[in-house]
Image (cartoon, rainbow, N blue to C red):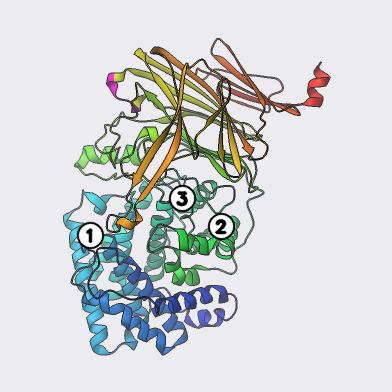
Amino acid sequence: MTQPLLIAGREDVLREEIRDVRSPQFRRLVDECERYTSIALPTEHPLASITYIGAASANLALAYRLTGQQHYLDELRRWLTPALSFPHWGKANMPDHDLDAGWLLHGLSLAYSWAGDALADDERLALRDKLVLQGTRLYEFAVDSEGDWWSSSYWQNHNWICYAGLATAGYALREEHEPARAWTERAKGNFETVLSMLPEDGSNNEGVVYWRYGVPWLVTYLDVLKSEEGIDWFATSDYLRNTFWYRLYQAAPDMERIIDHGDCHDRRSGHPVAMYYKLAAEYRIPQCQWLADKVANEFFWREAYESGVRPGVRAEAYQELLWFDPSAPSEGPQGLPTSRVFTDLGLVVGRTSWDDDAAMVSFKASPGGGHKAWETSHRIKQETGWTTLNAGHHHPDSGTFVLLGFGAYLALDEGYSSRKRTEHHNAVLVDGNGFVNEDRYHVFENLGHEYEAHLVTTTVGAGWVHAVSETSAMYDRALGVTRARRHLVMTPRGVLVLVDDLRASEPRTWTCLLQTQNPSRASGESRWIAEAGTGSLLVSALDDAPKSEVVPTAVHANPTSSTPSLAIEKVQHTLRRSTEPTTTGRFVTVLEPRPWNDPVGADVTVSEDDGLVTVVVDHGDVTEVATVHLESGAVVGHDEADIAGDGFAGRTTDRARRDDAR
């Protein structure tokens, strides 16, 4: 056999370090392997996924390799038995050709490399032959299906997982099975293409949960490539260099939970400790190492037990041990800017501070998959006929936002849904209609290039966040929508100001939606309060929309078809405000996060002059003034503005300054 994958030349150092600087990671590995002894393994292939067998095999093999303890090898034998006895890997969906095959090829190939020599000859040959069989099946499927589904779905986690598994098997078998070299070459060609097509800003259209599930496989592949061929693609990948920032700025203020744009099973499945360690090691990002340690010490077990993603964080113990770099710097985020723009995904994020009770907004607008994927996939489709963009986890959520404050989710995204609808989001409906092609799983499938949402402009700084989205192209052309422009401002105190400027060629009924955890209740004329545990949301409508109602909105999802027990059913509550039919709709909404026990909000007023909309938020001690112009490119100036940008100015005045001005 060849030298052991990933650890050749490191074994003696690792054995020393697991007694010292890697002892916490070694403890994790040992505990995980001990857990396996109490798990009953199937004798027949279940309908549910068997991905966990791959990771368990890698963990047990590494524990044996580093310690030489026989019981780890004996337990590895027990775990290999079902994988070798099943005629196919995967049952509910694409046997031999999808995630089960990718996961098992990776994990069992590492087990073969790390512990194969310790197995009896017949055991080792059986494992080798099974890897050859399954690798051949996956390779042939990838070749035969090129241009369709995961083989050429460059922005999709299935592509990354399956090709990473195929590559690991190829490296493990290349000295014994010559065709395996074709596996590694094909995987290399695929990932070279993938890395060239991923967005430089590090964002992910599938959302945090699938980022956490899928992106570690990019890192897994680059790690084995670097180890086995000496090729360092970490150094040249802008995507991986920046992707931690996407994850950090999609962390809720408490850092434990997440912003749940896209298909998110829950709000806690977001922390790949192992990958944090690897990104910290490769790019020397202090906040990456800090977050890895914080998760490992404070959040890990709650995610392990509550996550709806399988096989979950516990499976990655071997990578945590191997990827941890004790020399990586560590520092919290307090010195970082509180806002950031991710241009490819059209994502604008801001928070009032890095404290746990901060207010936070996340606002987005982009075409399916993000700008680079949308443009590139349409070009490839035109040139080759291939389908390369499978953005089924991307929602019809352009122009929508999520708002948190005081430890609570105040304005919601629905998370995971099987039939994705615009009305599940904080969006605008036109005659009751959301975006074109909705009410299905993959809402961007077969859409023409012209169905493209985008950000018009952004301005962030001095505690202010300003962004403008344009989503008119996302509605059915029969509706005649010519403008669907949302101006969003978050003030330094965390108040959200929304101005929706809506136009159509014929009179339409426009409906502004606000999703909350519990029903909003009226608290005055054109005012509502939505309670959410530790926080409350005060809603003020500063427009003349005559109709309002609060209705329940049911959301269903079945993230794992093979495991119906993991289906998600929930109800969120929607404040719907509607105009009379008109060609020019306008909503002006102010959302103020408040602590649950202090629901008295600011005084808010609005004025408009020739397209210039000014919202004044008077907190008593401080007044915040947000001014937006409805036309892009217009200059909005004020001598005392904290910040000014394209069509925007933000100004804060304290009581003393107001008194002096008088």
Residue 556 visible in the current orientation: yes
**Chain-order first, disc 1 or disc 3:** 1
The question of residue 480 being in magenta is answered with no
Mark 2 vs mark 3, foreground winner is: 2
Which residue corresponds to the image point at 55% horizontal and 54% vertical from the top-left? 256
Q: Residue furthest right?
A: 660
Marks 1/2: CA distance?
A: 37 Å
Whether residue 294 is situated above or below residue 345 in the rendered picture = below
Q: Which residue is mark 2?
A: 288
Question: Badge 1: how crowded within 10 Å, few (<14), some, or many (20+)?
Answer: few
In the image: residue 596, left or right of residue 422: right
Q: Main secondary structure of the magenta part?
A: helix
Whether residue 627 is situated above or below residue 173 in the rendered picture = above
Q: Which amino acid does the dot numbered 1 rest on?
A: Ala
Region of the chain picked out in magenta, as a range = 474-478
Mark 1 vs mark 2, foreground winner is: 1
Q: Which residue is mark 1?
A: 92
Residue 349 visible in the current orientation: no
- Identify the disc placed on residue 238: 3
